[in-house]
Image: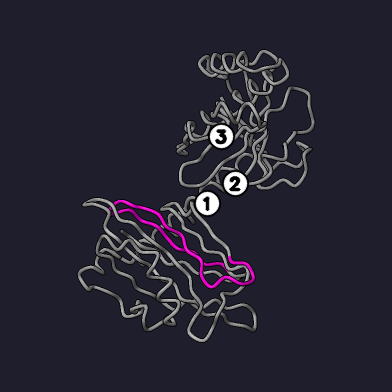
């Protein structure tokens, strides 16, 4: 079904179910041109999905943007979600063509690009090669790397992801233990870290109907020859037996009025994806994000200032 040469490619039959789905989605589009685009994108993604599953790479087809009817309508995307890694763009190419078209909306938030040659009958496909990044709409097929590089690359990304997750798990802060007074010494009462005015403003954010606990930590962000220190404050308020409200705040240290400009506060999920973020301007005295989470849920707080960043990881 495949061929192994110095430059690895892969040829095969497109499954009847994939062809049927592509035809169905094609007919739902407003114009024949858009319909053909969706058909080819669907065939390309389906074929790459089958190949990667055959090579024991876990995919999540339904999580891909190209499977979203709204995304199909307004965008030209052919992404395949690779579990725990990211989105791989699967760009269709017709027989005889020497270039791959990569639309602007597909030139970011991708872990790589695969060119998929689709036969005129829509029954066969061939994976022509792979490239990690693109910076132009038109990519020559001759620029692609062997398909073997794709498998090596996905293995590297998965290994790196597992390593990061392991490091996060090993350094998790069990913040619900704060209610039992099990608190690491680096997390102090906020009165020791913030000015009186900041504490007053800080307390107004809390839900006083329920018990809550707040702790703060000094965070150092080093930039070349300078060093900025801010205060990270985390507040936990029980919502019910299985859910907690969490407030994450950043304040300047005592003696400082404003936070550094362009300081980014991000909340990351277990996979390391950013789910919420805030950024300071020139005169921010604090920034904060608030969310709810279930007992046992993991999240991380990431602070970014220029080329300096730090992460604190928590379990609710």
Magenta-drawn stretch, dominant element (helix, strand or loop):
strand
Q: Which residue sits at x=37%, y=84%? A: 192
**Residues at badges 1 and 3 in contact (C-beta under 8 Å)?**
no
Which residue was labeled with disc 2?
Answer: 111
Q: Which residues are magenta?
A: 280-304
Inspect the magenta stretch and tell me whether residue 295 lies in it. Answer: yes
Q: Which residue sits at x=54%, y=60%? A: 278
Callout in the foreground (1, 2): 2
The N terminus lies in quadrant: top right
Callout in the foreground (1, 3): 3
Say what secondary structure mark 3 lies in: helix
Instruction: Assess disc 3: are there few (<14), some (14-19) or many (≥20) residues with their C-alpha within 10 Å of its C-alpha.
Output: some
Q: Which residue sits at x=64%, y=31%? A: 127
State which quadrant residue 70 falls in: top right
Among numbered discs 1 and 3, the one appearing first in the sequence: 3
Q: What is the C-alpha distance between the residues marked 1 and 3?
A: 21 Å
Callout in the foreground (3, 2): 3
Is 269 situated left or right of 78 in this image? left
Which residue was labeled with disc 3?
Answer: 65
Q: What is the C-alpha distance between the residues marked 3 and 2?
A: 14 Å
In the image, which disc is placed on residue 157? Answer: 1
Give percent across and percent down for residue 193: 41, 82
Q: Is residue 77 above or below residue 298?
A: above
Inspect the magenta stretch and tell me whether residue 248 lies in it. Answer: no
Q: Is residue 52 above or below residue 212?
A: above
Q: What is the C-alpha distance between the residues marked 1 and 2?
A: 9 Å
Work out whether residue 53 or residue 248 is closer to the camera in this orientation and state it.
248
Work out whether residue 279 or residue 111 is closer to the camera in this orientation and state it.
279
Among numbered discs 1 and 2, the one appearing first in the sequence: 2
**Residues at badges 1 and 2 in contact (C-beta under 8 Å)?**
yes
Say what secondary structure mark 2 lies in: loop
């Amino acid at each position: 079904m495949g061929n192994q040469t110095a430059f690895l490619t892969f040829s095969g039959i497109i499954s009847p179910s994939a062809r049927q789905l592509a035809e169905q989605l094609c007919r739902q589009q407003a114009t024949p041109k858009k319909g053909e685009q969706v058909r080819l994108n669907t065939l390309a993604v389906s074929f790459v999905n089958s190949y990667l599953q055959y090579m024991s790479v876990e995919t999540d087809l339904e999580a891909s943007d190209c499977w979203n009817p709204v995304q199909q309508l307004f965008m030209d995307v052919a992404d395949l979600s690779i579990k725990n890694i990211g989105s791989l763009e699967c760009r269709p190419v017709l027989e005889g063509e020497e270039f791959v078209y990569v639309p602007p909306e597909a030139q970011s938030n991708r872990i790589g690009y695969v060119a998929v040659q689709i036969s005129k009958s829509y029954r066969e496909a061939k994976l022509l090669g792979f490239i990690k990044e693109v910076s132009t709409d038109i990519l020559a097929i001759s620029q692609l790397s062997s398909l073997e590089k794709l498998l090596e690359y996905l293995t590297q990304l998965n290994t790196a992801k597992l390593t990061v997750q392991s490091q996060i798990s090993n350094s998790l802060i069990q913040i619900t233990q704060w209610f039992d007074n099990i608190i690491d010494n680096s997390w102090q009462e906020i009165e020791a870290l913030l000015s009186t005015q900041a504490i007053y403003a800080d307390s107004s954010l809390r839900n006083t109907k329920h018990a809550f606990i707040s702790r703060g930590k000094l965070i150092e962000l080093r930039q070349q020859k300078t060093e900025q220190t801010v205060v990270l404050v985390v507040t936990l308020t029980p919502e019910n037996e299985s859910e907690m409200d969490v407030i994450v705040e950043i304040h300047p240290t005592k003696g400082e009025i404003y936070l550094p400009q362009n300081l980014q506060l991000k909340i990351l999920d277990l996979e390391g994806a950013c789910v919420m973020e805030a950024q300071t301007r020139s005169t921010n005295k604090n920034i904060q994000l608030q969310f709810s989470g279930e007992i046992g849920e993991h999240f991380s707080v990431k602070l970014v200032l220029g080329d300096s960043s730090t992460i604190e990881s928590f379990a609710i």
